Amino acid sequence: MSRVQAPSDETTGNLVDRLLSGLPAEAVLVDPDVTTSYANDMASFCEAGVPAVVVLPRTVDQVRHVMRVATELRVPVVPQGARTGLSGGANASEGCVVLSLTKMDRILEINPVDRIAVVEPGVVNATLSRAVNEHGLYYPPDPSSWEMCTIGGNIGTASGGLCCVKYGVTAEYVLGLDVVLADGRLMSTGRRTAKGVAGYDLTRLFVGSEGSLGIVVGATLALKPQPPQQLVLAAEFASAAAACDAVCRIMAGGHVPSLLELMDRTTVKAVNDLAHMGLPETTEALLLAAFDTPDPAADLAAVGELCEAAGATQVVPADDAAESELLLQARRMSLTALEAVKGTTMIDDVCVPRSKLGELIEGVERVAEKYDLTIGVCAHAGDGNTHPTVCFDAADPDESRRARESFDEIMALGLELGGTITGEHGVGILKKEWLARELGPVGLEMQRAVKSVFDPLGILNPGKLF
Amino acid sequence: MSRVQAPSDETTGNLVDRLLSGLPAEAVLVDPDVTTSYANDMASFCEAGVPAVVVLPRTVDQVRHVMRVATELRVPVVPQGARTGLSGGANASEGCVVLSLTKMDRILEINPVDRIAVVEPGVVNATLSRAVNEHGLYYPPDPSSWEMCTIGGNIGTASGGLCCVKYGVTAEYVLGLDVVLADGRLMSTGRRTAKGVAGYDLTRLFVGSEGSLGIVVGATLALKPQPPQQLVLAAEFASAAAACDAVCRIMAGGHVPSLLELMDRTTVKAVNDLAHMGLPETTEALLLAAFDTPDPAADLAAVGELCEAAGATQVVPADDAAESELLLQARRMSLTALEAVKGTTMIDDVCVPRSKLGELIEGVERVAEKYDLTIGVCAHAGDGNTHPTVCFDAADPDESRRARESFDEIMALGLELGGTITGEHGVGILKKEWLARELGPVGLEMQRAVKSVFDPLGILNPGKLF
């Protein structure tokens, strides 16, 4: 791939002129005070450049124009949704065009017979979720940022959420895409049918490609029928190991919870400190399980017994939806609460086979001790997907260094245990050295070659992933 | 891509010698009486060449050797499983190496906590299904040929089955792959974790690639907990349109059947003629619905009411598993029964949005009339995936021509209705002109470019897909 250079002032002037030839003035932002605010997503420790220009297209044709100009002038393009990502995947590179898809936010179709929705990329996840609910339908992917993040961003990072243990990740809901290629050509992938195997699955190739292969300008999404309201159970354990043992018993027992989450002692304490929720302060690990089945109380009873067999010190099934929601709120505010501990966090996203969850959490405790750091773990335990969250004071250089090193050590441990460096947050800038390690030389070479097919000039979100 | 030529006798001698340098003698078949029997899969109207040699490796290293030799000598390689495919995707090309993976048939691991199985490609689908059942687990993909077809073949064609309406297709169960590349290098893709987004999803790229990108030598598969035994309901309709209306009502009603199949009048009659099963001869369409939920009888009752609302003339829920199995047997023997009508069939695989199912079936009736042919339709109705099956006498050139033309006309209709030319059988040789039509010029160009990345010499299953 050829190297992309940051454009000079003159080049920037030319770039803006060319962009304005196919975009309305209000869709082209050049004021540095404004454009700088588009430089970062929500990741820590990821460099970002200053965009030359931010464009906010409203139509597919406008996106095509942007890409034609970028190709012509060899200017890097960084596509963005709501910039809630946690790996720097949406960070601007110096002198780039930031291509924000947030104004393309229409829901074009919701079809209850075909169980699909057709959307533009800027639709907010929660907006879509609520809209399909009104038709008795359910769009499962629910990243923590669901009230802000966009479907396009979810597709770019293949994001997950709490629902994945039963319903899978974003990738499983993307049937077809409209993609503007690097040179401005429009390509449709996939289908609007329930099944289809015509040619290579380019749809899935684009999901999780972090804007490095093309610009997603439309998506056909699969929907599920809305399940019954879920009921939540909380179980308290005297050790994280016992909680992980319960997770293994639940999954080996053939249960299909709609949610199976773990919060460690550090996380429980942080949530209590922030929100005074009255979670049991003395607990070493809290497990939340939910079922959205026809008889959730029966399922919770069975799972409660398994928790007790694994040594749970207390098992509390919620009686109703309101109590369930309260328990989930505690889980949902975990990251915010951990952020409050020291001001800054690095949120990891290591996923291991769930049978190795206990070993991972034990390892994280060792790492925290070694580096003298507070590391809270909350986890989508049913998926083996953990978010070890390093709490540190960014103003303290030594603590920052230790935070970074501990973060790396946790990823190394994840790989050792047969896991992956990222379960749902993506690679971005944060983990690109680690991606090479996970893929190995042959895998990396083939991935780069695929990138070259779609982006021969290397203008699409350069410096990410590889 | 460079053109691959069929090797001369001298080249073949050299090829066999080189293959024997890394394979035991019994793994290299050269007797033309034997090798010719590997020339075809089960598709009609697909040309096939005579293989120069058939190899039956038992190890990954042996497959790597085969690919190194093939690359060195520029000889085409056609990977094969059980050759039950229906699109000619496994047909030999003239002078090729047929690489049969049937001897690599070990199940390496079944893990009930992680809910995965690790297998070699030659494992027969039914063997795996039964093996995981013993652990309380379920491997859903169930193509009609499940007693014969291999997991490697299922991955190559991304095959489906009766279960897909609830459980999805093969692609959704492939977590990671070991792949021998065209030049003999080994690449691992994906993961053994429940989630993972590290880099591009090359796993999914290989699923359905019909052996044209590399040789799958190992797979990590996701498993589900074994559901309760399903219960089946049969509903009889006075028209196919009414049955399709019932399908739409069932799906729009939020039901999640484990199976929702349709047999048209022609198919019902063919099954009765073959097996004297006592299906209602006067029916215009038979719908089979099943539920594997905790209370299937309640679900069947609700669905039965929807069928009656759509005009069902009779609704018969099975009382038990044995009665359910009998109804399914009728569906399972549909293709065999249609084959018996005229001796030969062309089985189509058009999938439309399920809201268009009625229009497609009506269109097929028009096509049958226009070409004066018997065309039976059985369908995975819940997925909108139909198998219009043209019955003809292959010894009658005019009828054969009409069969071929009607087949094409049905695909054109599928595309018109927003569908795809193949829901689960793949493209192979049979539909490659049609693939170009479905993908359009940009999509086709990008797919070819992806092919070139993995197969720069064009030796992997040449002449298929494109």
Image (cartoon, coloured by chain):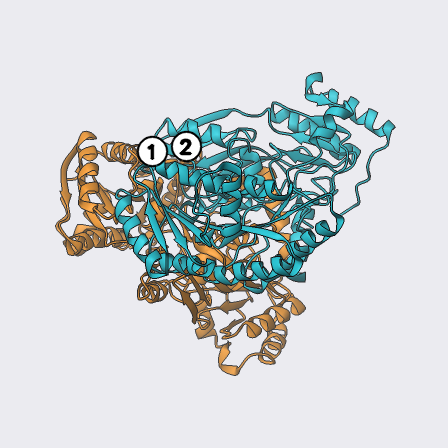
Chain colours: A orange, B cyan
Q: Chain of mark 2?
A: A
Pick the residue in front: B286 or B67. Answer: B286
* Residue A224: percent from left, percent from top: 36, 55
Secondary structure beneath disc 2? Answer: loop
Instruction: Find residue A417 and name its label.
Output: 2
Q: Quadrant of residue A407?
A: top left
Quadrant including the N terminus of chain A: bottom right
The residue lying furthest to the top in this view is B25
Q: Is residue B49 left or right of residue B392?
A: right
Q: Is residue A183 left or right of residue B2?
A: left
Image point 73% across, 22% down: which residue? B29
**Residue picked out by circle 1:** A363
Residue count near mark 1 (Cα–Cα under 10 Å), binned few <14, some 14–19, many ≥20: some
Image point 52% across, 29% down: which residue? B124
Indicate the amino acid at tag 1.
Answer: Gly
Q: Is residue B383 left or right of residue A185?
A: left
Secondary structure beneath disc 1? Answer: helix
Disc 1 to disc 2: CB gap under 8 Å: yes
Residue count near mark 2 (Cα–Cα under 10 Å), binned few <14, some 14–19, many ≥20: some
